[in-house]
Amino acid sequence: MTGGAEWGESTRHVPRSRHSHRAQPVPRGGAATRARAVQLGKLVAALMSVTLLLGFGYGWYEYRSLDNGLQRLHLSNLAGAGTPAKPGSKFKGTEQNILVVGLDSRDGLSAAERRLLSVGNDNSLSTDTIMIIHVPADGSKATMISIPRDSYVDIPGGYLKNKINAAYADAYVDSSGSDKQKQAAGANELVSTVGKLTGLKINHYIQVGFGGFYTITKAIGAIPVNLCHSTDDTIAHNEATGQGGVGSNFKMSAGKHNLTPVQAMQFVRQRHNLTGGDIAREKRQRYFLAAAFNKIASAGVLLNPVKLSNLIKAVTGSFYVDDNGFSLADLAEQMTNLSAGNIVGYTIPTQGTSTVNIGGLSQSVELVDPAKVKSRIARILAGSAPSAPGTATAPHSSTSAAPGTASRTATPAPKADAGCID
């Protein structure tokens, strides 16, 4: 990852004499003076280089330690390594599809933090965030594809057709062994379910809960956001408007703001009082990821030992990943060319909501057509999506796709998130 500034060659400027406009003979000792100036310049340059190398060396040491604190899950349903970069390319990465899962878990949060964030005390096995991040071998861009948690899909392994966020929980509950083995079973089932729906080979897996998300936002610091409209998702407002005692407690005026860690949690959790409900929340999650990447990639984090160390500590123990060769450090190195402007986001096409019977219970679901999902994703990754400016899910430039993702009429071409965030 790189910051906003570029390092180039420095130029040495030798000041002219006050009398340089006159033709003057070179005084004795002039060559020696110039030689001493050159030596002094080299000394200063050397000292600066050592300082920079020490700073980057510390950063690189911390950076490589990212992987040491990751929790590893043994997954058997992954596709293995992706397609490597072309022979002779200066890039050493591989094309890969990474399944990113946000688990509705309060693990890692103290009682005070749970009250502060208004997340309650109930732990859940629901996967509220399901997102595929596609990264090409050269790491020059990233495509985020969200899958609504209520998508009504086939779940392999003999389970009932259900909402996709039940796949993890079904396999977790059916598995025996340690909690880590149960998590691996849940992750394996979700990998298979997502692969069947999208037609994509999933190469790697990342899982994080509320606790990890919150500690990471605290380490990063303020996150910029540009709201299209004012919003009030406080419990008091929702009770007064007849929605009941629900809400993320996010309340903010339209325009540009810097979110505190608490506000960031509220921002990505809000789904009431938004056009599109869960689909709108997914756009916010993609927006936040792009904004967070932009913040982490800045020199303010990477070249600040304290902030970098805090970020490493936040990741430690917060992430569960596969043991199939996944490395956060290697992924970050692969994506050194990536800027927030090259991060685009989409939601799979849905066909409206319906009420279905699942195991004797009436459930509201999002209808999806797997054939259309596969076709849309193939077009997105083939680069047929519009490339007009402002399609990136980055702060100040993107994120709110036009309403209509729940329509039964397919759009002629996939559209990336665009505009301010709802």
Image: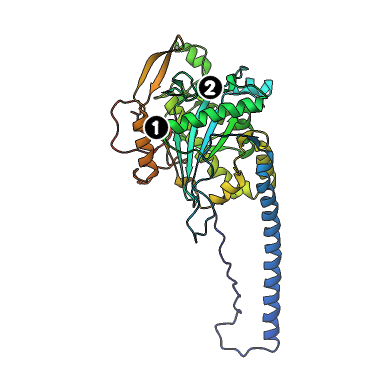
Q: CA distance from mark 2 to mark 1?
A: 25 Å
Q: Quadrant of residue 70?
A: top right
* Residue 292 in picture, x, y percent from top left: 55, 40
* Residue 343 in picture, x, y percent from top left: 46, 43
Tell which of 275 and 75 is nearer to you. Answer: 75
Residue occupying the point 51% across, 19% down = 247
Residue farthest along the top direction in this orientation: 360
Q: In the visual, does 395 lie left or right of 407? A: right
Residue occupying the point 55% across, 36% down = 205
Q: Is residue 191 above or below residue 40?
A: above
Are there few (<14), some (14-19), or many (20+) residues within 10 Å of tag 2?
Answer: many
Q: Is residue 182 above or below residue 56?
A: above
Asked if residue 38 can be seen in this view, the reply is: yes
Q: Mark 2 sits on what residue?
A: 248
Asked if residue 119 can be seen in this view, the reply is: no
- Marks 2 and 1 in Cβ contact (< 8 Å): no
Tell which of 148 and 300 is nearer to you. Answer: 148
Quarter holding the C terminus is top left
Q: Mark 1 sits on what residue?
A: 348
Type of amino acid under label 2:
Ser
Badge 2 element: loop
Residue occupying the point 58% across, 37% down = 222
* Residue 369 in picture, x, y percent from top left: 35, 27
